[in-house]
Amino acid sequence: MAKSIRHRLFAALAGFTVLLCLCYTGLALVIAYVTEDMLVQRLLEREAAVVSQRLRQYGELTPSGSDLITVYGRYLDLPQAVRAQVSPSAPRGEVFTTAGQHYHVLALDLVAAGQPRRAYLLADVAPVLVVQRLVREVGGVVAGVAQALVSACGQLNQPAYP
């Protein structure tokens, strides 16, 4: 009877530990994704400030200084995959394509020569995203180690003799 209670207690503690680890792993992934999105948004906002300043100085839209960000003067100039998912009135958007591309779009409401004008910043962020790649490359190893540890704990919990 004492062994039965000990086994149940061990199983409950092991289950709680696994649940706690899963919760923290999920929380860490959510924080990583949110941080990644905030970083991309911050890059777009900085580039928007530069584009606005250049438009005021030179009177025309100039190319972005970043090789990740492209400036578009009209909505119809955006790639078809982006236009299919982001409306012309949306202030920002995030687009995933079936080809593996990942875009962030930021609409800019500018004034050029006294006339309001809307331009778009399009960031192709797939090359700089690390969380998804990390999960894909390391996630299987972590899951395998976790499964092996849970299995090993289950073996330790078995009585040595019948």
Image: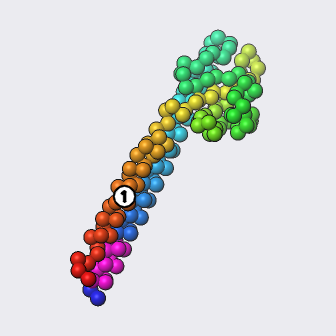
Nearer to me, 122 or 116: 122
* Residue for badge 1: 146
- Residue 67, by quadrant, is top right
Q: Could one spot residue 55 in this view of the protein?
A: yes
The span picked out in magenta is 3-13
- Residue 126, by quadrant, is top right
Q: What main secondary structure does the magenta stretch of the protein show? A: helix
Q: Is residue 92 left or right of residue 45?
A: right
Residue 90 vertical placement versus 115 (above, below):
below
Q: Residue at x 26, y 78 (%)?
A: 159
Q: Secondary structure at mark 1?
A: helix
Nearer to me, 106 or 21: 21
Nearer to me, 134 or 105: 134
Residue 148 in picture, x, y percent from top left: 34, 60
Q: How many marks?
A: 1
Q: Residue furthest top?
A: 58
Residue 101 vertical placement versus 161 (above, below):
above
Residue 117 in picture, x, y percent from top left: 74, 23
Q: Quadrant of the C terminus?
A: bottom left
Q: Residue at x 31, y 78 (%)?
A: 7
Q: Residue at x 64, y 38 (%)?
A: 97
